[in-house]
Amino acid sequence: MSDVKRAFIFDMDGTIVDNMAFHTRSWITFFERRGQKIDADEFFRATAGRQGKEIMRTYIGEHLTDEENKRLNEEKESVYRELYKPHLKTLDGFDDLVAEARKHNVSLAVATSAPNANIEFTLDGLDLRRHFDVIVGAADVARGKPEPDGFLLAAQRCGAAPKDCIVFEDAPLGVEAARRAGMRCVVLTTTLPAEAFASFDNVIHIATDFSELTTLELFGD
C-alpha cells in the first residue's frame, strides 16, 4: 500500500453492530410511554444518524431545556440498552477486516452520533475499544449527521486527509455526511436495501456485512 496515511472510519450503530431496529424500537417504546404514536419506518428514515438531543427537540418540542433534554435522552437510552443487551454482537467479518487493516497500517476510527454511555455499552461490552485509534461521539461535535463534523474530526485525529478515508455506514444521512466530508463510503445494508443509496456518488461498495471486504480492494491497490 501507499505510504500516504489512510483511515477506515466506522459508524457504530447499524454498522459495527446490527442494532438499528432496537434503537428504533426503543424510541417508539419511549414515545408510547409518553402517549405519542410514531411510525417506525418513517422515524428511522428521518432520524438515523442524528443526535438524540436533536430528535428529542423534533418530536417533543424546542421548549426543552438542555437539562430536560439530557434527562429524557438518558431515559430513552436505558430502554435501548435493556432491549439490545441480549443481542449484542459485531457484524460478520468485522474482526477480520480490522485485523487486516492493521497489517496494512490503516488507522481505525469510530465516528458515531451515540452518547458516551452507548459507546461504552457497545465498544467496551464487546471489547472493541482496543482496535481503534480514534473514537468520536456525540459529545465531541455540535452537529450530527448529515453534517460532516464527526467524520472530519475523526480524520483529523487520525492524521489522514478526507480523500484518503473510507467511511462505513448504514444510513443515508451518514452517507451524505461522508459525501460532504469528501470521503468515499461503503454501505452496510443492515437497515435499508441497496436501492436507498442509489443517488450517492461517493458509495464505492454495498455489502450485507464485512465478510467479503478487503482493505486492498477498497483502497483500489
Image (cartoon, rainbow, N blue to C red):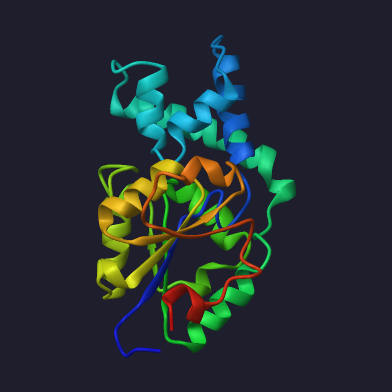
Whole-percent x and y of residue 145?
34, 43
Which residue appears at 37% of the width and 27% of the height? 69
Left-right relation of 95 to 133: right
Q: Quadrant of the N terminus?
A: bottom left
Q: Nearer the viewer, residue 31 or 91?
A: 91
Please say if 92 is above or below 56. Answer: below
Whole-percent x and y of residue 23?
58, 37
Which residue appears at 60% of the width and 16% of the height? 33
- Outermost top residue: 35
Left-right relation of 28 to 67: right
Which residue appears at 34% of the width and 16% of the height? 61
Left-right relation of 180 to 167: left
Whole-percent x and y of residue 82?
67, 39
Q: Picture quarter containing residue 156?
A: bottom left
Please say if 74 is above or below 141. Answer: above
Q: Nearer the viewer, residue 48 or 83?
A: 48
Report the number of discs.
Answer: 0
Q: Quadrant of the C terminus?
A: bottom left
Please say if 218 is above or below 168. Answer: below
Q: Nearer the viewer, residue 129 or 24?
A: 24
Whole-percent x and y of residue 50?
39, 38
Q: Picture quarter containing residue 22?
A: top right
Left-right relation of 203 to 24: left
Please say if 12 is above or below 26. Answer: below
